[in-house]
């Protein structure tokens, strides 16, 4: 499959019945504070509470019948796992989700509630991949990778399609970057629909492999340090990075303190729940990492799955 606007629009049509067309919200207070017009695409209101519902649903419903009957599998710290579990339930096929043992309880419950089988592993990338390979060998399931899958990337790009349909003439579109599925899909969609728009991603300083890779022009894998933005700990994928290099304009990094501050600001000002990973792009604005004065900025708020017993400002 070629990842282009046609593939993203096809994904949009395929998943339309199964996902929400989420709201775009604004805040006069945040506009005044930033000197910009900010438009928040609220994927925290999406099915399973995150944008991941888009890509997983597109990938699962793109499988032929014979393949689908054998089931699907993935490894995920939470949101993608829940998204695959939900998509599998909708299609009536089994799902096997490999999750690190330190995954947030709210995300483990979400996967289980959709009827998927959870297989725990050690909290390392190597353990996740090895356990998933073992599960696939035993079950015959098809891997739905969280970001190195063109159907997943196309599905993620549908959020940017909706954003630009609802808010034309944006100067800048922002999203977080972890494995790079959302950024790749967003960049292709945005640049195809509006060639002059800038696409800038943000990630934690403590998990800055995508920013390092972008500067170097090649994929650099880093040993992940601790970051509150648990959804962004993954190293950027090779196929994703090739797309990102071609279409994205920049990747900036933010401090842990800025992520917590941005998360709290969104909660207190807009009265909506966002998880730390979702707050990272707004943190880049608050921390002055990009110039947004007098610009129209679209920000994809990626999810709202938060462990309410472990809010960062209470720790």
Image (tube, grey):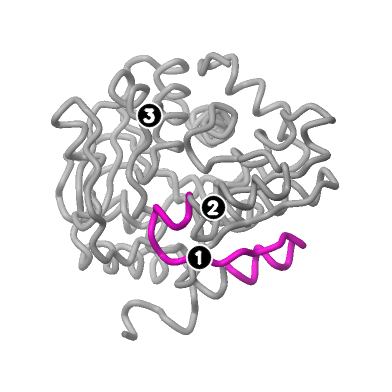
Query: Of label 1 and label 3, which has the lower sequence position?
Result: 1
Image coordinates of residue 260 in percent, x first then y, are 29, 68
Label ID, residue 170? 3
Query: Of label 2 and label 1, which has the lower sequence position?
Result: 2
Please indicate whether residue 287 sits to the left or right of residue 97 in the image. left
Label ID, residue 121? 1
Is residue 257 shown above or below 91?
A: below
Q: Is residue 123 magenta?
A: yes
Which quadrant of the rendered structure holds the C terminus? Answer: bottom left
Label 2 neighbour load within 10 Å: few <14, some 14-19, many 20+: many
Residue drawn at x 26%, y 40% is: 210
User: Helix, strand, or loop for circle 1?
Assistant: strand
Please indicate whether residue 145 sits to the left or right of residue 246 in the image. right
Label ID, residue 75? 2
Residue drawn at x 58%, y 23% is: 8
44 or 180: nearer the viewer: 180
Query: Of label 3 and label 2, which has the lower sequence position?
Result: 2
User: Helix, strand, or loop for circle 2?
Assistant: strand
Image coordinates of residue 176 in percent, x first then y, are 36, 46
| Quadrant position of residue 248 | top left
């Amino acid at each position: 499959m070629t990842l282009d606007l046609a593939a993203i629009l096809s994904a949009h049509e395929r998943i339309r019945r199964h996902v929400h067309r989420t709201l775009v919200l604004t805040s006069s207070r945040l506009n005044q504070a930033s000197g910009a017009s900010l438009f928040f695409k609220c994927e925290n209101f999406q099915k399973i509470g995150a944008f991941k519902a888009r890509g997983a649903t597109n990938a699962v419903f793109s499988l032929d019948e014979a393949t689908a009957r054998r089931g699907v599998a993935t490894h995920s710290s939470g949101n993608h796992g829940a998204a695959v579990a939900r998509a599998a339930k909708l299609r009536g096929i089994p799902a096997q989700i490999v999750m690190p043992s330190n995954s947030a309880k709210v995300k483990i419950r979400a996967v289980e509630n959709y009827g998927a089988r959870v297989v725990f592993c050690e909290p390392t990338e190597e353990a996740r991949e090895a356990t998933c390979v073992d599960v696939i060998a035993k079950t015959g399931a098809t891997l739905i990778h969280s970001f190195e899958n063109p159907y997943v990337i196309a599905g993620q790009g549908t959020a940017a399609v909706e954003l630009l349909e609802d808010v034309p003439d944006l100067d800048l579109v922002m999203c977080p970057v972890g494995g790079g599925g959302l950024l790749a899909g967003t960049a292709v969609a945005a640049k195809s629909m509006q060639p002059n728009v800038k696409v800038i991603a943000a990630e934690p300083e403590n998990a800055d492999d995508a920013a390092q890779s972008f500067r170097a022009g090649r994929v650099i894998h880093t040993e992940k340090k601790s970051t509150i933005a648990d959804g962004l700990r993954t190293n950027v994928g090779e196929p994703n990075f090739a797309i990102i290099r071609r279409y994205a304009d920049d990747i900036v990094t933010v401090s842990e303190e800025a992520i917590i501050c941005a998360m709290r600001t969104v909660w207190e000002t807009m009265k909506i729940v966002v998880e730390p990973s979702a707050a990272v792009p707004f943190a880049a604005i608050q921390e002055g990492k990009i110039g947004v004065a007098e610009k129209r900025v679209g920000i994809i708020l990626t999810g709202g799955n938060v462990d309410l017993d472990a809010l960062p400002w209470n720790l």
